[in-house]
Amino acid sequence: MRSDLIFGALAHVTNRYQLCQLASKATRKLHKPNTRLQDTTNDVLVRFHNSNPVAGPVASFEQHAVEQRRAA
């Protein structure tokens, strides 16, 4: 369920507004055409659960998004 993913992501980002902003930006960058937006959002929340999106450098996250887009 998505609520479990959100609570998992809140372990690293305590501010819910900031979590929504980060998740929407990451979803826009990682979304692939012809896939469901819901699946991309779930992938982003899983990534946020596994690593701290605020602590890492933004440039490497954006670089990773560009690499994934090219691979698709």
Image (tube, rainbow, N blue to C red):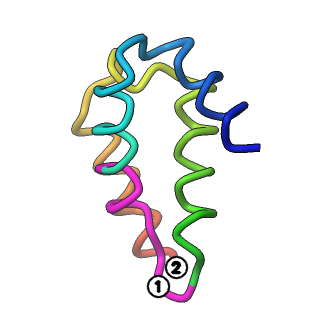
Q: CA distance from mark 1 to mark 2?
A: 9 Å
Residue at 65% in and 23% down: 8
Magenta residue check for 27: yes
Residue that extends furthest to the left in the rendered view of this protein: 59
Dominant SS type (magenta): helix
Q: Residue flagged by tag 2: what amino acid is it?
A: Ala
Q: Residue 6 versus residue 61: which sits nearer the camera?
A: 6
Single out the mark in the foreground, 1 or 2: 1
Q: Which residue is mark 1?
A: 33
Q: How far across and down, in percent of the image, does residue 11 sit?
A: 56, 12
Residue at 67% in and 35% down: 3
* Left or right: 23 in relation to 18: right
* Left or right: 3 in relation to 17: right
Dot 1 surroundings within 10 Å: few (below 14), some, or many (20 or more)? few
Q: Which residue is mark 2?
A: 72
Evaluate if marks 1 and 2 touch, with contact meaning CB atoms under 8 Å apart: yes
* Left or right: 18 in relation to 44: left
Residue at 56% in and 25% down: 9
Say if 33 sits above or below 12 in the image.
Answer: below
Q: Which residues are magenta?
A: 25-34
Q: How far across and down, in percent of the image, does residue 60 sit?
A: 31, 38
